Amino acid sequence: MRDRIALLAALALCAAVLPPTPAPQAAGQYATTSVPRMPLPEFKALLDQDAIVVIDVRSRDAYRAAHIPGALSVPLETVAARAAELKAAGKPVVAYCA
């Protein structure tokens, strides 16, 4: 269940349903969103431990141009069709789109 929530939250971000980055509210402060984000050191550690499945939800052309080593190309419009495959990996799924 936690995996599904993390995937859906990441996909919501990648689907561009969030507004642009808000302007600073006060001295370097930005409004927060409800989309969970993973700190880079944690991401790197989990990736190095092969403890997560990383999916690149950009177009296949963007994936071919550059991607995180080990990431799977799962364009956003194909995620629902591949959900069972991703869940079968038995690991949390981390999606990225930039």
Image (cartoon, rainbow, N blue to C red):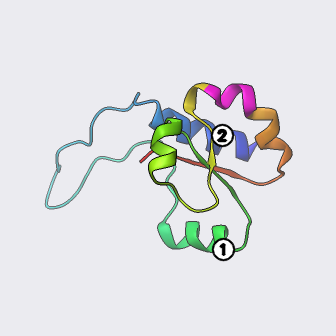
Which residue is the site of mark 2? 5
State whether residue 27 is above or below residue 64. Answer: below
Give the percent coordinates (x, y) of residue 11: 54, 36
Q: Is residue 3 left or right of residue 43?
A: right
The correct choice, above or below, for 31 with respect to 26 in the image is above
* 21 magenta-colored: no
| Range shown magenta | 78-82
The three-letter amino acid code for the residue at tag 2 is: Ile
Q: Residue 77 or 29: which is nearer the viewer?
A: 77
Counting from the top left corner in percent of width and height, residue 46 is at 66, 69
Q: Look at 56% across and 31% down and name the residue there.
A: 76
Sequence-first tag of 2 and 1: 2
Q: Nearer the viewer, residue 67 or 79?
A: 67
Residue 89's place in the image compared with 81, above or below, is below
Tell me the residue at 41%/48% (across/down). 98
Q: Quarter of the image holding residue 42?
A: bottom right
Image check: 84 left or right of 4? right
Find numbered disc 2 in the image and state the secondary structure of the residue it sits on: helix
Give the label on residue 48, or none. 1
Nearest to the observer: residue 82 or residue 12: 82
Helix, strand or loop under label 1: helix
Question: Residue at 75% of width from left, 33% of height from top?
Answer: 83
Q: Is residue 6 visible?
A: yes
Quadrant containing the N terminus is top right
Main SS, magenta region, reads helix
Instruction: Locate residue 22: give its quadrant.
Output: top left
Residue 58 visible in the snapshot = no
